[in-house]
Amino acid sequence: MYFQKKIDDPQGFMLFASILYFFWFLMSPSFSLRNIAVGLICCLGVTYFWSPDLFKAGQPFRIAPRQVVRLAVYLLLLAYNVVVANIHVALIVLSPKLPISPGFILVKTKLEKELTRTLYANSITLTPGTITINLNKDRLLVHALTKETAQGVYEWHLENRLREMEVGRVD
């Protein structure tokens, strides 16, 4: 049936579900019993559903404390970049000349792991003025609102932050 799938990495499963549960509480409007129960069911369900993609045989899912700190710094830097990009896009939209020059760019990433590539692609999409259209192995197809924004994607320092999380250093 549906629930006969074997979980290869139970520790990784619980770690990932706990991370999702932590974010559930960050976004949660209340700490009622119903909200706690719904969050737990959702986080376990999502982790279970995606477990074949998240947990590969022979590759345990582990996060070092250093990676948690680097992820927190990354998320703070991402939030800052989102605010700056919001202001930039607002200035473009409110400008009487509407100085846009939309286009597509192909970006080759140095990131090696699927999870960090996905995080990077989603970070580009979260930043106003850019949208990741496609992620295929190490290549991202990105739509940018202006030429300056497109150039900024090529030079975005957050890719190096994710690279630090992957390998512990930047090449």
Image (cartoon, rainbow, N blue to C red):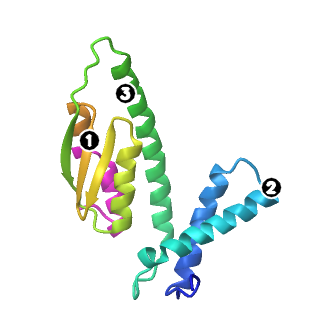
Q: Let me know if residue 22 is in the magenta part.
A: no
Question: In this picture, is 149 found above or below 110?
Answer: above
What is the three-letter code of the residue carrying label 1? His
Assign a secondary structure to mark 3: helix
- In the picture, measured across the screen, residue 132 lies left or right of residue 59, that is left
Q: Which mark is residue 89?
A: 3
Residue 18 appears at what percent x and percent y?
61, 69
* Residue at the spot 48% in from the left edge and 72% down from the top edge: 50
Residue 108 appears at what percent x and percent y?
19, 56
Q: Quadrant of residue 130?
A: top left
Q: Quadrant of residue 169?
A: bottom left
* Residue at the spot 20% in from the left edge and 32% down from the top edge: 147
**Label 3: few (<14), some or many (≥20) within 10 Å?**
some
Q: Let me know if residue 169 is in the magenta part.
A: yes
Residue 129 appears at what percent x and percent y?
33, 35
Question: In this picture, is 61 found above or below 120?
Answer: below
The answer to whether residue 65 shows anywhere in this view is yes
Mark nearer the N terminus (2 vs 1): 2
Disc 3 from disc 1: Cα separation: 14 Å
Of residue 4 and residue 39, the one placed in the foreground of this image is 4
Residue 15 appears at what percent x and percent y?
57, 74
Disc 2 from disc 3: Cα separation: 38 Å
Q: Which mark is residue 143?
A: 1
Disc 2 from disc 1: Cα separation: 41 Å
The magenta-colored residue range is 152-171
